[in-house]
Image (cartoon, rainbow, N blue to C red):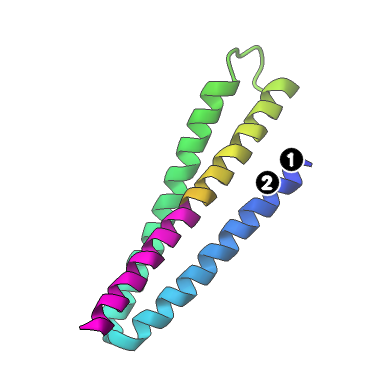
Amino acid sequence: TNKQTNKHRKQTYKTNKHKQNKQTKRKMDEKLSPELQKKLEQHVVNSAIRQNMELLITLSSDCFEQCVHTFPSKLMDKTETSCVEHCADRYIALSQRVGQEYQKIQMNKVILARMKGSSN
């Protein structure tokens, strides 16, 4: 069902973020002083929280605007609920896809930089 798919996407997104944060932390461990490392880790955590909040706010606003047009009661009807769920699923899937493509681009930049560095 849509709810299960949405829940799976959210779990996958969190798992991927967790793995990415662990990899970033390992790289930071190698080069930074403990104080600077702690500040950087806090910045990364705050940045992730801020991005997730912005995503939720944008998703809520966009999906509400697209799906809810009247206010006959304090509850959404089945059509509005279904529309919001579908919109949220699409939005999360798109966000994940953009994040994955961005990671690929960044990884390619790192690889190119390493290749240029090793050829000098």
Instruction: Please say if 88 is above or below 14.
Output: above
Residue 62 spot, x, y in % from top left: 50, 29
Name the foreground residue: 17 vs 61: 17
Where disc 1 sits, the SS reads helix
Quarter of the image where one finds residue 32? bottom left
Name the foreground residue: 14 vs 38: 14
Instruction: Please say if 58 is above or below 43.
Output: above
Instruction: In the rendered structure, find residue 85 and report the number of the disc placed on it.
Output: none
Q: Residue at (55%, 39%) from the top-left corner?
A: 91
Q: Amino acid at mark 1?
A: Asn
Q: Amino acid at mark 2?
A: Asn
| Rendered-image quadrant of the C terminus | bottom left
Q: Is residue 115 left or right of residue 25?
A: left
Q: Is residue 71 visible from the viewing direction of this image?
A: yes
Q: Residues within 10 Å of mark 2 (few under 14, many from 20)?
A: some
State which region is magenta: 99-120
Q: Furthest-front residue in view? A: 119
Q: Is residue 108 left or right of residue 62?
A: left
Residue 13 spot, x, y in % from top left: 57, 57
Residue 69 spot, x, y in % from top left: 58, 14
Instruction: In the rendered structure, find residue 6 and report the number of the disc placed on it.
Output: 2
Q: Are marks 1 and 2 in contact (CB under 8 Å)?
A: yes
Q: Residue at (48%, 69%) from the top-left corner?
A: 20
Is residue 110 part of the magenta span, yes or no? yes
Q: What residue did someone put label 1 on?
A: 2
